[in-house]
Amino acid sequence: MACEYRADDWDTYQMDYQNPHGPVERPEREVAVVAAALETLREAGVIPHTQYDHGKLLAHREAVRDNFEIPWTAITPRMQRVIYAVNAIHRPRNMIAAGIFCGNTFISNAGAAVGPGACYTAEKLIGVEIVEAEAERAERNVRRIDPTGTAYILAADAVDVVAEFPDEIHLLYLDADGRGGRGKAIYLEILEAGLDRMPPGSLVLAHNSVNSADTLEEYLTFVRDPANMSASVNVVVDREGLEVSAR
Ligand SMILES: C[S@@+](CC[C@H](N)C(=O)[O-])C[C@H]1O[C@@H](n2cnc3c(N)ncnc32)[C@H](O)[C@@H]1O
């Protein structure tokens, strides 16, 4: 069933994309907004509970601030916390993130299993970026906080990587902006490439559910159809938004 969490200040809450580490709001406010979003996900049956280690999230955040080269990012602190928490709660054994630019979105997911924010052990955490130079930078960033190699970056087309992944996919994160003018409409193609290996309960997180809602119309219609996904929630904590859907 389709539903939504919308913070009352979603359209005025804003960070500086060039300075993602600067304070945006009181920490208690960020925690409260994310707690309310997680409760909506729990009520919809997307996640089993809302508990995550707040200290580990802050350790993860500090490690990214100190080690990642980030030219810009649209991942707000609220969104970083939502993505980290969903991964910390869901604990995907295999996670693929599609269209990860410098790796900030990827590590918001993978940071629940690698680096100082780790709270469980994963098998494969793969970030896919089609622009080789960006993939190389993302790999350099990730290596600084994950020496184990569990989290790694591939310079490739996410459609191909997802289609060829031989194991189950427990969480798929979508942020690719497509080729040949397709833009974010590529989300559905990436999801369809992996759907047959996504077991019941597996999750799909789609960034830009708000500010790219028009381009994502076909994708959003698909994931909000109960024939395709058991539940789907539009998490509107900021102007970008994140559609979180459960298989
Ligand atoms: C807009 S960026 C995502 C940025 C992210 N939301 C953030 O705030 O850090 C989208 C990325 O997807 C990549 N991309 C586009 N099509 C792709 C594809 N088919 N496979 C993998 N990456 C792709 C682009 O090169 C770009 O780096």
Image (spheres, rainbow, N blue to C red):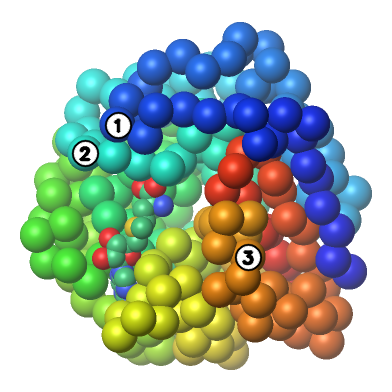
Look at label 3 and name its amino acid.
Ala
179 left or right of 86 in image: left
**Between discs 1 and 2, the one toward the N terminus:** 1
**Location of residue 34 (image quadrant):** top right
Which residue is denoted by mark 1 in the rendering? 18
- Mark 1–mark 3 Cα distance, whole angstroms, equals 24 Å
- Residue 221 seen: yes
Q: Which mark is residue 28?
A: none
Badge 3 density bin: few <14, some 14–19, many ≥20, Cα 10 Å: some
Q: Which residue is mark 3?
A: 213
Judge from the rendering whether residue 212 lies leftward or rightward of residue 69; answer left or right.
right
**Residue 62 appears in which quarter of the rendering?**
top left
Does the residue tagged 3 have its C-beta within 8 Å of any atom of ligand 1?
A: no
- Where disc 1 sits, the SS reads loop
Under circle 3, the secondary element is: loop
Q: Position of residue 237 (x, y in %)?
A: 67, 38
The kind of residue on which mark 1 rests is: Gln
